[in-house]
Image (cartoon, rainbow, N blue to C red):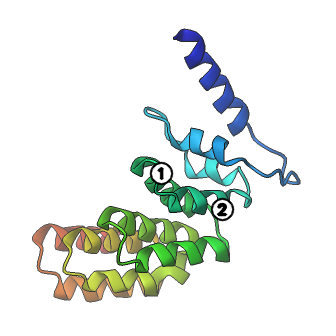
Amino acid sequence: MRSSFFALGLSLFLFLAPRPAHAQTQVSRAEVEAILSGFEDVPTLAEIGALGPTAVPVLVAIHDDAQVIQPVRLRAVEAMGAFHTAEARTFLLRVMNDPHEGTIVVREAAEALAQSAGEGGVQPISRLLTSTDRTLREGAIVALGRIRAESARHQLELQLARETETDLRARITALLAR
């Protein structure tokens, strides 16, 4: 048992070790699935970003594979926030607009889009503010709160005027006070 934990730890250490900027090694799906499958340790966006842009299509494939367990698929969406590429943005928008995606996955895609696209994500994230689903509105509020742009602030101000949930109004107020 101890040796398997040691082997897993060593594999993750070697896999997550910093790679030179010039190295564009293709990451394997098995490697990415392994780091997204942790129970106690979840990789940071910086660690995911260090994998390089070749990880983007791997993350898409993991998310799109219904045979992969849901927590790993959700982490693949979250991990996409580490990449500032058109491919990452296209994927996140697809997930946000897919009527078959679960609420939590759409919310995570919105938050990842805020990380990935910054101000470029304000408009698509803002569309979630009109949802009747409280969880989606809350996710959009959180995502917009992470974007340091006047357009995001403006959307939060508009939402404050129409939001009916007291705790979401308080959250918006706190975000606007920063």
Q: Position of residue 133 (x, y in %)?
A: 21, 74
Q: Nearer the viewer, residue 136 or 61?
A: 61
The residue carrying pointer 2 sits among few (fewer than 14), some (14 to 19) or many (20 or more) residues within 10 Å by Cα, namely many
Does 52 sit left or right of 145 as displayed? right
Q: Nearer the viewer, residue 135 or 34?
A: 34
Say which residue appears at 41% left-offset and 63% top-offset.
Answer: 108
Numbered disc in front, either 2 or 1: 1
Residue 85 in the image: above or below residue 126: above
Q: Could you tell me the amino acid type at mark 1? A: Gln
Does 50 sit left or right of 19 as displayed? left
Q: Position of residue 80 (x, y in %)?
A: 56, 62
Q: Secondary structure at mark 2?
A: helix
Q: Could you tell me the amino acid type at mark 2? A: Val
Q: Which residue is farthest front?
A: 67
Does 158 sit left or right of 40 as displayed? left
Quadrant of the rendered image containing residue 170: bottom left
Say which residue appears at 38% left-offset and 63% top-offset.
Answer: 105
Task: Name the residue carrying label 2.
Answer: 56
